[in-house]
Image (cartoon, rainbow, N blue to C red):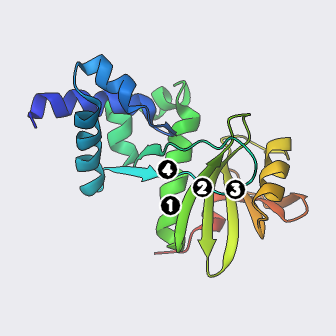
Amino acid sequence: MLPAAMGRFWTMLAHYHAQVWNGSEIAASMGIAPNTARAYLDALEETFMIRRLPPWQANLGKRLVKTPKIYFRDSGMYHALSGIRSPADLLTHPKLGASWEGFALEEILRSHQPDDAYFYAVHSACELDLLMFLHGRKVGVEFKRADAPTLTGAMQTALADLELDELWVVYPGQRTYPPGKKISVRPLAACIAPG
C-alpha cells in the first residue's frame, strides 16, 4: 500500500462520512480495483480511524439497505480532510449535519458501550441513524443538528418496525422533552456518562 494512494483514498473517503459506503465508486475514481479500496478501508478501520457501522438486517418485508455506513472516528481528522479550518468554516459547511452526526455517534457509543450497534435504512427512505442493543433493550438514536427537533414520520416508522423500547433524538440543545410516546429529545450532554 503506497502512502500517497492511501492519502488520496483517505481524502476521498471524507466525502462518504455519515453515508453508505460505495467502494466501487471510490475505486473507479482512483483507478484501483474494488477489493483494493476495501483493503484500504479495512486498514483504516483496524487502526481505529474509521468506523464501519453495519446495517441492521431483519426480515421485515422491506427492501433494506445492506451496505455499511462510514464514519471518521476523529472529528478533527474529518474536518482537516474536508478543508474545515475553523468553527466559522464548520457552521457554513454543507456537511455540518454529517459532522455533528459522526461526533455525537462516537460519544454515545463510547459512553454506553452497547452489546451491538447498527443503523437501519429502507430503500424507500425510512432511516434510523443508530440502533443499539443495551442490556436486552433496543434503543434507537436519531442525530439532529437543529434547535428544536420535532417528531417525524420516519421516526414513528422506525419505532414500530424495529419494536424499539425507546427512541432518543439527540441534538446540541439544552432541553429534554417528549415529542411522542417512547420518544425523547435529549441534549448530547445528557446522553453521555462523565469521564
122, 76: nearer the viewer? 122
Disc 4 target residue: 103
Disc 2 target residue: 56
Please state if 89 lies on the left or on the right of 172 as rendered.
Answer: left
Please state if 135 lies on the left or on the right of 106 as rendered.
Answer: right
3 or 4: tag closer to the N-terminus: 3
Residue 189 marker: none
Helix, strand, or loop for circle 1? helix
2 or 4: tag closer to the N-terminus: 2
12, 144: nearer the viewer? 12
Q: Nearer the viewer, mark 1 or mark 2?
A: 2
Q: Amino acid at mark 1?
A: Glu
Query: Farthest residue toward the left?
Result: 2
Spot occupied by residue 48 in the image (x, y as percentages of width and height): 30, 56
Residue 59 marker: 3
Disc 1 target residue: 107
What whole-number distance in Å separates the C-alpha atoms at marks 1 and 2?
20 Å
Q: Contact, CB < 8 Å: mark 1 with mark 3? A: no
Residue 188 vertical placement versus 8 (above, below): below
